[in-house]
Image (cartoon, rainbow, N blue to C red):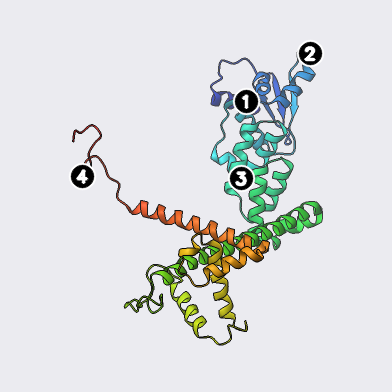
Amino acid sequence: MVRAEASRILTVVGAEDMPEPDVRVITSDGLLIFAHSKVLAAASPVLENVIERPRKGRSNCSNITILGVPFDAVSAFIKFLYSSKCSEDQMDKYGIPLLALSHVYLVPQLKQMCTKDLADRMSIEDVVDVLQLARLCDAPDLYVKCMKLLSNNFKMVKAGDGWKFLQKHDPLLELEILQFIDESETRKQRMRRHREDKDLYIQLSEAMECLEHICSEGCTTVGPIDMDPSPHKGPCAKFTTCHGVQLLIKHFGTCAKRVNGGCFRCKRMWQLFRLHSSICDQPNGCRVPLCRQFKFKAEQDGSDARWRLLVRKVVSAKVTLSLSTLHAKKEKEPRRTIGDQGFRPWFQKT
Protein backbone atom coordinates (compact mmCIF):
# COMPACT_ATOMS: atom_id res chain seq x y z
CA MET A 1 0.00 0.00 0.00
CA VAL A 2 2.88 2.33 0.78
CA ARG A 3 4.52 1.53 -2.57
CA ALA A 4 1.20 2.22 -4.29
CA GLU A 5 1.12 5.69 -2.76
CA ALA A 6 4.63 6.43 -4.01
CA SER A 7 3.87 5.21 -7.51
CA ARG A 8 0.75 7.33 -7.61
CA ILE A 9 2.86 10.42 -6.92
CA LEU A 10 5.21 9.55 -9.74
CA THR A 11 2.32 9.00 -12.15
CA VAL A 12 0.81 12.38 -11.32
CA VAL A 13 4.00 14.26 -12.11
CA GLY A 14 4.85 12.14 -15.11
CA ALA A 15 8.08 10.81 -13.62
CA GLU A 16 7.81 7.16 -14.61
CA ASP A 17 11.38 7.23 -15.96
CA MET A 18 12.90 8.54 -12.72
CA PRO A 19 15.14 6.27 -10.66
CA GLU A 20 13.97 4.47 -7.55
CA PRO A 21 12.98 6.74 -4.64
CA ASP A 22 15.82 7.32 -2.19
CA VAL A 23 13.96 9.15 0.61
CA ARG A 24 11.37 7.85 3.05
CA VAL A 25 8.95 10.40 4.57
CA ILE A 26 7.66 9.10 7.90
CA THR A 27 4.27 10.50 9.03
CA SER A 28 2.50 10.58 12.39
CA ASP A 29 0.46 7.50 11.48
CA GLY A 30 3.63 5.47 10.98
CA LEU A 31 3.04 5.26 7.25
CA LEU A 32 5.79 5.95 4.74
CA ILE A 33 5.87 7.99 1.55
CA PHE A 34 8.75 7.26 -0.81
CA ALA A 35 10.16 10.21 -2.75
CA HIS A 36 13.24 11.46 -4.55
CA SER A 37 15.77 13.53 -2.65
CA LYS A 38 16.61 15.76 -5.61
CA VAL A 39 12.98 16.78 -6.07
CA LEU A 40 12.47 17.55 -2.39
CA ALA A 41 15.77 19.39 -2.07
CA ALA A 42 15.03 21.53 -5.11
CA ALA A 43 11.59 22.50 -3.80
CA SER A 44 12.50 23.20 -0.15
CA PRO A 45 15.79 24.50 1.33
CA VAL A 46 14.82 23.05 4.70
CA LEU A 47 14.35 19.57 3.25
CA GLU A 48 17.62 20.04 1.38
CA ASN A 49 19.46 20.54 4.68
CA VAL A 50 17.69 17.56 6.24
CA ILE A 51 18.57 15.35 3.28
CA GLU A 52 22.21 16.44 2.95
CA ARG A 53 23.07 16.08 6.63
CA PRO A 54 22.73 12.33 6.97
CA ARG A 55 24.13 11.71 3.48
CA LYS A 56 27.63 12.87 4.40
CA GLY A 57 29.67 9.71 4.10
CA ARG A 58 26.58 7.51 3.71
CA SER A 59 24.73 5.99 0.79
CA ASN A 60 21.69 4.43 2.45
CA CYS A 61 18.13 5.74 2.06
CA SER A 62 17.38 8.86 4.11
CA ASN A 63 14.46 9.23 6.52
CA ILE A 64 12.48 12.47 6.89
CA THR A 65 10.02 12.68 9.75
CA ILE A 66 6.97 14.95 9.37
CA LEU A 67 4.77 14.74 12.44
CA GLY A 68 1.77 16.59 13.78
CA VAL A 69 -0.34 16.55 10.59
CA PRO A 70 -2.46 13.81 8.99
CA PHE A 71 -0.92 11.40 6.49
CA ASP A 72 -3.13 12.70 3.65
CA ALA A 73 -1.94 16.27 4.32
CA VAL A 74 1.70 15.14 4.13
CA SER A 75 0.90 13.24 0.94
CA ALA A 76 -0.68 16.37 -0.60
CA PHE A 77 2.40 18.35 0.47
CA ILE A 78 4.82 15.91 -1.19
CA LYS A 79 2.69 15.91 -4.34
CA PHE A 80 2.88 19.68 -4.47
CA LEU A 81 6.67 19.54 -4.23
CA TYR A 82 6.62 17.37 -7.36
CA SER A 83 3.93 19.09 -9.40
CA SER A 84 3.47 22.62 -7.90
CA LYS A 85 -0.26 21.88 -7.96
CA CYS A 86 -2.89 21.36 -5.29
CA SER A 87 -6.54 20.53 -5.90
CA GLU A 88 -9.45 22.49 -4.47
CA ASP A 89 -10.55 19.42 -2.53
CA GLN A 90 -7.11 19.11 -0.91
CA MET A 91 -7.13 22.80 -0.06
CA ASP A 92 -10.58 22.48 1.45
CA LYS A 93 -9.63 19.50 3.62
CA TYR A 94 -6.01 20.25 4.49
CA GLY A 95 -5.57 24.02 4.01
CA ILE A 96 -4.50 24.60 7.63
CA PRO A 97 -1.86 21.80 7.87
CA LEU A 98 -0.60 22.66 4.36
CA LEU A 99 -0.05 26.26 5.43
CA ALA A 100 1.90 25.06 8.46
CA LEU A 101 4.01 22.72 6.32
CA SER A 102 4.67 25.41 3.68
CA HIS A 103 5.88 27.77 6.42
CA VAL A 104 8.06 25.23 8.23
CA TYR A 105 9.70 23.93 5.05
CA LEU A 106 9.89 27.31 3.26
CA VAL A 107 7.72 26.65 0.22
CA PRO A 108 6.49 30.20 -0.61
CA GLN A 109 4.32 29.26 -3.59
CA LEU A 110 2.25 26.80 -1.54
CA LYS A 111 2.15 29.25 1.37
CA GLN A 112 0.70 31.95 -0.87
CA MET A 113 -1.92 29.54 -2.23
CA CYS A 114 -2.91 28.38 1.27
CA THR A 115 -3.09 31.93 2.59
CA LYS A 116 -5.41 33.04 -0.20
CA ASP A 117 -7.58 29.94 0.05
CA LEU A 118 -7.95 30.17 3.82
CA ALA A 119 -8.80 33.87 3.56
CA ASP A 120 -11.58 33.05 1.06
CA ARG A 121 -12.98 30.09 3.00
CA MET A 122 -12.64 31.54 6.50
CA SER A 123 -15.80 31.75 8.64
CA ILE A 124 -16.72 33.22 12.01
CA GLU A 125 -16.56 29.76 13.59
CA ASP A 126 -12.90 29.12 12.70
CA VAL A 127 -11.53 32.67 12.52
CA VAL A 128 -9.76 32.37 15.90
CA ASP A 129 -7.98 29.17 14.84
CA VAL A 130 -6.96 30.65 11.49
CA LEU A 131 -5.77 33.82 13.25
CA GLN A 132 -3.52 31.83 15.58
CA LEU A 133 -2.09 29.93 12.61
CA ALA A 134 -1.55 33.13 10.61
CA ARG A 135 0.34 34.59 13.56
CA LEU A 136 2.54 31.50 13.99
CA CYS A 137 3.18 31.12 10.25
CA ASP A 138 3.99 34.79 9.63
CA ALA A 139 1.14 35.37 7.16
CA PRO A 140 0.40 39.11 7.56
CA ASP A 141 -2.32 39.34 4.88
CA LEU A 142 -4.27 36.47 6.40
CA TYR A 143 -3.66 37.89 9.90
CA VAL A 144 -5.14 41.27 8.97
CA LYS A 145 -8.14 39.69 7.25
CA CYS A 146 -8.80 37.54 10.32
CA MET A 147 -8.56 40.59 12.54
CA LYS A 148 -11.03 42.54 10.41
CA LEU A 149 -13.53 39.67 10.31
CA LEU A 150 -13.17 39.18 14.06
CA SER A 151 -13.53 42.90 14.74
CA ASN A 152 -16.67 43.22 12.63
CA ASN A 153 -18.29 40.17 14.26
CA PHE A 154 -16.79 40.33 17.74
CA LYS A 155 -20.02 39.57 19.63
CA MET A 156 -20.53 36.33 17.70
CA VAL A 157 -16.85 35.33 17.98
CA LYS A 158 -16.80 36.09 21.70
CA ALA A 159 -19.65 33.65 22.27
CA GLY A 160 -17.79 30.76 20.57
CA ASP A 161 -15.52 28.10 22.02
CA GLY A 162 -12.50 29.38 20.11
CA TRP A 163 -12.51 32.66 22.00
CA LYS A 164 -12.87 30.91 25.37
CA PHE A 165 -9.91 28.67 24.53
CA LEU A 166 -7.92 31.72 23.47
CA GLN A 167 -8.60 33.51 26.76
CA LYS A 168 -7.26 30.56 28.73
CA HIS A 169 -4.20 29.68 26.66
CA ASP A 170 -3.11 32.81 24.75
CA PRO A 171 -3.80 36.04 26.70
CA LEU A 172 -1.25 37.97 24.60
CA LEU A 173 -3.17 37.30 21.40
CA GLU A 174 -6.38 38.24 23.19
CA LEU A 175 -4.77 41.58 24.09
CA GLU A 176 -3.66 42.09 20.46
CA ILE A 177 -7.23 41.48 19.28
CA LEU A 178 -8.74 43.91 21.78
CA GLN A 179 -6.16 46.57 20.86
CA PHE A 180 -6.88 46.06 17.16
CA ILE A 181 -10.62 46.43 17.77
CA ASP A 182 -10.05 49.61 19.77
CA GLU A 183 -7.77 51.09 17.11
CA SER A 184 -10.20 50.06 14.38
CA GLU A 185 -13.06 51.82 16.16
CA THR A 186 -10.89 54.89 16.61
CA ARG A 187 -10.09 54.91 12.89
CA LYS A 188 -13.78 54.59 12.04
CA GLN A 189 -14.64 57.53 14.29
CA ARG A 190 -11.82 59.58 12.77
CA MET A 191 -13.00 58.79 9.25
CA ARG A 192 -16.59 59.59 10.23
CA ARG A 193 -15.53 62.98 11.61
CA HIS A 194 -13.46 63.61 8.48
CA ARG A 195 -16.46 62.91 6.24
CA GLU A 196 -18.70 65.11 8.38
CA ASP A 197 -16.15 67.95 8.31
CA LYS A 198 -15.75 67.56 4.55
CA ASP A 199 -19.52 67.75 4.07
CA LEU A 200 -19.62 70.87 6.26
CA TYR A 201 -16.89 72.60 4.24
CA ILE A 202 -18.69 71.75 1.00
CA GLN A 203 -21.94 73.16 2.40
CA LEU A 204 -20.17 76.34 3.48
CA SER A 205 -18.54 76.64 0.06
CA GLU A 206 -21.92 76.27 -1.62
CA ALA A 207 -23.39 78.80 0.82
CA MET A 208 -20.71 81.30 -0.23
CA GLU A 209 -21.61 80.90 -3.90
CA CYS A 210 -25.28 81.08 -3.02
CA LEU A 211 -24.73 84.31 -1.05
CA GLU A 212 -22.98 85.90 -4.04
CA HIS A 213 -25.77 84.66 -6.31
CA ILE A 214 -28.49 86.21 -4.13
CA CYS A 215 -26.67 89.51 -3.58
CA SER A 216 -25.71 90.00 -7.23
CA GLU A 217 -28.50 88.35 -9.25
CA GLY A 218 -31.35 88.02 -6.80
CA CYS A 219 -33.40 84.88 -6.28
CA THR A 220 -37.05 84.20 -5.44
CA THR A 221 -37.98 87.01 -3.00
CA VAL A 222 -34.51 88.21 -1.93
CA GLY A 223 -32.12 90.29 -4.00
CA PRO A 224 -30.22 93.57 -4.33
CA ILE A 225 -32.05 96.86 -3.60
CA ASP A 226 -31.68 98.08 -7.19
CA MET A 227 -33.14 94.91 -8.65
CA ASP A 228 -36.65 93.51 -8.53
CA PRO A 229 -36.96 90.06 -6.96
CA SER A 230 -37.38 87.15 -9.32
CA PRO A 231 -40.97 86.46 -10.28
CA HIS A 232 -40.29 82.79 -9.82
CA LYS A 233 -41.62 81.85 -6.37
CA GLY A 234 -40.48 78.25 -6.29
CA PRO A 235 -37.24 76.91 -4.79
CA CYS A 236 -33.93 77.86 -6.37
CA ALA A 237 -32.75 75.34 -8.93
CA LYS A 238 -29.07 76.33 -8.76
CA PHE A 239 -28.24 75.79 -5.09
CA THR A 240 -29.73 73.45 -2.51
CA THR A 241 -28.82 75.87 0.29
CA CYS A 242 -30.41 78.91 -1.38
CA HIS A 243 -33.71 78.73 0.49
CA GLY A 244 -31.97 78.52 3.87
CA VAL A 245 -29.64 81.44 3.08
CA GLN A 246 -32.61 83.56 1.97
CA LEU A 247 -34.40 82.85 5.26
CA LEU A 248 -31.26 83.87 7.17
CA ILE A 249 -30.99 87.12 5.19
CA LYS A 250 -34.66 87.95 5.81
CA HIS A 251 -34.30 87.27 9.51
CA PHE A 252 -31.06 89.24 9.69
CA GLY A 253 -32.73 92.29 8.14
CA THR A 254 -35.59 92.38 10.65
CA CYS A 255 -34.14 90.93 13.87
CA ALA A 256 -33.98 93.37 16.78
CA LYS A 257 -31.48 91.31 18.78
CA ARG A 258 -28.69 91.22 16.23
CA VAL A 259 -27.09 94.45 17.45
CA ASN A 260 -26.63 93.11 20.96
CA GLY A 261 -25.41 89.75 19.69
CA GLY A 262 -28.18 87.81 21.37
CA CYS A 263 -29.55 86.01 18.31
CA PHE A 264 -28.02 82.71 17.22
CA ARG A 265 -29.33 82.93 13.64
CA CYS A 266 -27.89 86.43 13.27
CA LYS A 267 -24.53 85.19 14.52
CA ARG A 268 -24.56 82.60 11.77
CA MET A 269 -25.27 85.34 9.22
CA TRP A 270 -22.40 87.46 10.57
CA GLN A 271 -20.12 84.40 10.22
CA LEU A 272 -21.25 83.87 6.62
CA PHE A 273 -20.50 87.51 5.79
CA ARG A 274 -17.09 87.26 7.47
CA LEU A 275 -16.28 83.98 5.74
CA HIS A 276 -17.24 85.43 2.37
CA SER A 277 -15.03 88.42 2.99
CA SER A 278 -12.09 86.16 3.84
CA ILE A 279 -12.53 84.28 0.56
CA CYS A 280 -13.53 87.13 -1.76
CA ASP A 281 -10.71 88.36 -3.99
CA GLN A 282 -12.61 91.35 -5.48
CA PRO A 283 -13.89 93.32 -2.47
CA ASN A 284 -14.16 96.63 -4.37
CA GLY A 285 -16.64 95.26 -6.89
CA CYS A 286 -18.36 92.78 -4.60
CA ARG A 287 -22.09 93.28 -3.98
CA VAL A 288 -22.25 91.16 -0.82
CA PRO A 289 -22.99 93.45 2.19
CA LEU A 290 -20.17 94.19 4.64
CA CYS A 291 -17.54 92.52 2.44
CA ARG A 292 -15.16 95.52 2.39
CA GLN A 293 -15.76 96.26 6.08
CA PHE A 294 -14.86 92.72 7.16
CA LYS A 295 -11.85 92.72 4.81
CA PHE A 296 -10.57 95.99 6.32
CA LYS A 297 -11.15 94.77 9.88
CA ALA A 298 -9.27 91.51 9.16
CA GLU A 299 -6.32 93.50 7.79
CA GLN A 300 -6.27 95.68 10.88
CA ASP A 301 -6.87 93.08 13.61
CA GLY A 302 -5.76 89.86 11.93
CA SER A 303 -7.45 86.50 12.48
CA ASP A 304 -6.78 83.52 14.70
CA ALA A 305 -5.31 80.25 13.48
CA ARG A 306 -8.61 78.34 13.70
CA TRP A 307 -10.36 80.86 11.44
CA ARG A 308 -7.53 80.74 8.89
CA LEU A 309 -7.73 76.95 8.89
CA LEU A 310 -11.49 77.14 8.29
CA VAL A 311 -10.97 79.51 5.37
CA ARG A 312 -8.39 77.20 3.80
CA LYS A 313 -10.69 74.20 4.17
CA VAL A 314 -13.62 76.02 2.58
CA VAL A 315 -11.47 77.27 -0.31
CA SER A 316 -10.19 73.74 -0.87
CA ALA A 317 -13.75 72.40 -0.83
CA LYS A 318 -14.78 75.10 -3.30
CA VAL A 319 -12.03 74.05 -5.72
CA THR A 320 -12.95 70.37 -5.33
CA LEU A 321 -16.62 71.14 -5.91
CA SER A 322 -15.83 73.18 -9.00
CA LEU A 323 -13.65 70.43 -10.46
CA SER A 324 -16.28 67.76 -9.80
CA THR A 325 -18.98 69.92 -11.41
CA LEU A 326 -16.78 70.54 -14.45
CA HIS A 327 -16.01 66.83 -14.73
CA ALA A 328 -19.73 65.97 -14.53
CA LYS A 329 -20.50 68.44 -17.31
CA LYS A 330 -17.80 66.97 -19.53
CA GLU A 331 -19.14 63.48 -18.93
CA LYS A 332 -22.62 64.57 -20.06
CA GLU A 333 -21.34 66.23 -23.25
CA PRO A 334 -21.42 63.91 -26.28
CA ARG A 335 -18.05 63.06 -27.74
CA ARG A 336 -17.59 64.24 -31.31
CA THR A 337 -16.10 61.91 -33.87
CA ILE A 338 -14.80 62.41 -37.40
CA GLY A 339 -18.24 61.64 -38.77
CA ASP A 340 -20.02 64.29 -36.68
CA GLN A 341 -21.53 67.20 -38.54
CA GLY A 342 -19.46 70.35 -38.42
CA PHE A 343 -16.15 68.60 -37.71
CA ARG A 344 -13.38 69.38 -40.16
CA PRO A 345 -10.35 67.07 -40.14
CA TRP A 346 -6.98 68.79 -40.06
CA PHE A 347 -6.14 67.54 -43.56
CA GLN A 348 -9.31 69.00 -45.15
CA LYS A 349 -8.78 72.13 -47.20
CA THR A 350 -10.84 75.21 -46.37
Residue 330: x and y in percent read 36, 51
Give 259 or 46, whichever is nearer the viewer.
259
Residue 17 coordinates in the image, percent (x, y): 56, 15
Judge the density around disc 1: few (<14), some (14-19), many (≥20) Cα neighbours within 10 Å.
Answer: many
Eye-nearest disc, 3 or 2: 3
Tell whether 113 sits left or right of 173. left
Residue kind at label 3, given as amino acid type: Leu
Residue 76 visible in rendering: no
Image height of 41 relative to 206, above or below? above
Disc on res. 58: 2
In screen coordinates, is 211 left or right of 157?
left
Q: Residue furthest bottom?
A: 256
Residue 278 visible, this orientation: yes
Toward the viewer: 292 or 155?
A: 292
Q: SS of the residue at dot 4? A: loop
Q: Amino acid at mark 2?
A: Arg
In the rendered view, tell whether residue 69 sits above or below residue 20.
below
Q: Is residue 315 left or right of residue 177?
A: left
Evaluate if marks 3 and 2 touch, with contact meaning CB atoms under 8 Å apart. Answer: no
- N-terminal of the pair, mark 1 or mark 3, is 1
**How far apart, in angstroms, are the residues tagged by discs 1 and 3?**
28 Å
Q: Report which residue position mark 3 lands on.
A: 118
| Mark 3 closeness class: few <14, some 14–19, many ≥20 residues within 10 Å | many
Question: Which residue type carries mark 1?
Answer: Ala
Nearer the observer: mark 1 or 2; the answer is 2
C-alpha span from label 4 to label 1:
76 Å
Residue furthest to the left in view is 350
Whether residues under marks 1 and 2 lie with C-beta atoms below 8 angstroms apart, the answer is no
| Mark 1 vs 2, N-terminal side | 1
Dot 1 falls on a residue whose secondary structure is: helix
Residue occupied by mark 1: 6
| Quadrant occupied by the C terminus | top left
